Amino acid sequence: MKRTIPLVITAVGGFVLIVAAFIPETEDWGEVAAIWFDILASIAFVLGGGSLLKLHLKKISDHAAGWGYSAVTLLAFVVTLTVGLAKTGTQPAPDQEFFGETFASLPLEAFPDSQVARIEGSIPQKANGANLPSSVREQLSEADGQIVFRGWMAPRQMTDLFEFQDELEWQCRVERLFEKAQPPTLLRGKVIYRTDHRALSVRGPMTDKQQTALLAMSEEVRWKDAVERLYEQSRVETSVKVKSVPDGFMVPDSAEGIVSHDTQAGELRAVGPLSVQLRDDLARYFPVAKPLVGERRDEFLRELEDRGDPLNAEQQKVFDAALNGVWSAEQLHIVLVDAGLAQPTPKTACDMLAEKAAGEAVIQPTKPVGADVVPNDAQRALLERFASDERMTAAELESELRSAGPFTAGQAAGLDKFLRKQPTVGERDKSLCMALLRVGWLSSGQRDFFLDPYRTEYAWRAKVGELFVAAHVPKYRWSGSYRAGGSPFWWIYEYLFKPLTATMFAMLAFYVASAAFRAFRAKNFEAMLLLGTAFIILLGRTFAGVMMTAWLPDSLSGLRVENLTVYIMGVFNTAGNRAIMIGIALGIASMSLKVLLGVDRSYLGSRED
């Protein structure tokens, strides 16, 4: 029986894969068979590992010949297996993490009844009998002529419900349900219930007022426990040592109450996890590089040349070209004009339903476009001033633009997006330094003049990144790759396995050379042909061989060694390889047939029990 079962599995699996490969209708069979193959392969790996342990442990215990090698093999196997399976030292996968959020487990049944949304109506039935979207299936129900939604609805869930049925009546009900299925204003955008994770989450640290508001929603023990855990975990303090902070550093408004700098202790501190946006706000604290024109560019050049030799002609061209490519006040004006163009506002489904009920013949999906907002003269003057004043910050520019005239949220977003794409002073100077070094020489003082601002920026961003990682609360601790750079498994592979394999192949080179010497003896015509071909191939792969026949004219270029090498490898070698591959394919087919039919049972081991 122990031989019959593996034989049946092999035969059935093989024939299924063959049928799936040649009959399109059975393609799914092959996918299912491949899944089962992976399961069986996993079991085989476990059995193989157990067999390895058994054999080498017995060899060590018996002190048989070579037991020391068994000990090394066993130790390497256990260490590699441990750090690989446990993913020791690996960071969670960024694309699966929830940066800036803290989670506390909470079953849906424990969600407060006071936060259950209800509206009049019924859930429509799809003509094809399709079920509700999976994202809302557990939260949405129908009872007593009402649609009931337990929990807080996310925008993604509303979109899924919109797509479930394209009738205005249903979509209007979804909009009204979405408005009702939201947390109180104090918690909106801050506290979330993630049904797919069975968890309550909060973005950033939870305040005392938010905790009080959550606790007042229900007397359920599980609810209160989840809120308390969430409050404590979201207010964990982390810190990193910082030697210095950027000149005039002030905590951004978005980080108020979350990030602080202790000048006496020399620490940058955070309460709770940091979001990606907050991390970028902190790291992007440095001023944007502004246009250098006229006297400002001449002064910048004088400061540079005071620290070393004057720039040569080629460097001067590179210097001017790099600085001429910086943004201008006119570009800022164009950004604000584009962002100020009135955009059509989509109507809600309830608005369109009301128009339909009123008998409107044609219902437009958008509202009438309003007036465009164009920067006035005072605002244009502010843009000019910002481009020329090194001390004026982007925050000051936005504040004064609002005071000088109409300034929309879209224009503010467009301005911020444009400035975020521009290099900082340190980034501009570093790029300029690299460009100048490619066409000339700079003294150490000139290099420091360019690179010191970037070094300061890099050190600060590294500290912000360190704080971001330290403050993060991993959701999936084992989600990272076991081969992630810097992990113990990666270290073993890079600094143990690779050197050992390189050493092995380096030793094989001597055996290959010895075998080639014995084989390449011109005893007969076949040996002479083999020796001559090998000699041409070896010469064609070296610089010396190419130089030997470089003097041949173009009319005889086919006789050059490198071209002869390509011809031999592309014609004679390819023909030989094809013959070998045909033979291998026939061998695989015949061997596979013997295995599938049970004629060859060597994979089952010896016949001795």
Image (cartoon, helix red, strand yellow):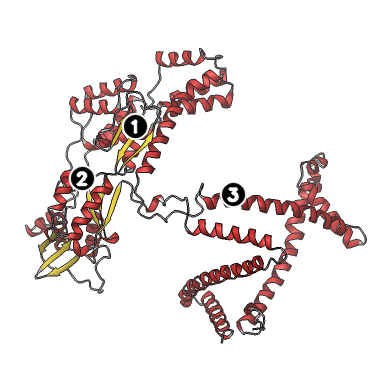
* Mark 3 or mark 1, whichever is nearer to me: 3
| x and y, in percent, of residue 164 in the image | 23, 64
| x and y, in percent, of residue 533 in the image | 82, 55
Q: Is residue 455 above or below residue 475?
A: above
Check disc 2 and report the residue beneath it: 344
| Point 67% across, 83% down: residue | 608
Check disc 3 and report the residue beneath it: 494
* Mark 2 or mark 1, whichever is nearer to me: 1
Query: Which quadrant of the view contains residue 18?
Result: bottom right
Q: Secondary structure at mark 1?
A: helix
Between discs 2 and 1, the one toward the N terminus: 2
Q: Amino acid at mark 1?
A: Leu
Q: Amino acid at mark 3?
A: Glu
| x and y, in percent, of residue 72 in the image | 64, 58
Q: Is residue 41 visible?
A: yes
CA distance separating discs 2 and 1: 26 Å
The count of marks equals: 3
CA distance separating discs 2 and 3: 57 Å
| x and y, in percent, of residue 134 in the image | 28, 65
Q: Is residue 466 above or below residue 149?
A: above
Q: Secondary structure at mark 3?
A: helix
Taking the image as shown, residue 259 lies to the left or right of residue 22, namely left
Q: Residue furthest left?
A: 358
Looking at the figure, which quarter contains the C terminus? bottom right
| Nearest the eye: 99 or 403 | 99
Q: Is residue 145 above or below residue 151?
A: below
Q: Amino acid at mark 2?
A: Pro
* Mark 2 or mark 3, whichever is nearer to me: 3
| Point 58% across, 83% down: residue | 7
Q: Which mark is residue 419?
A: 1
Looking at the figure, which quarter contains the N terminus? bottom right
Between discs 2 and 3, the one toward the N terminus: 2
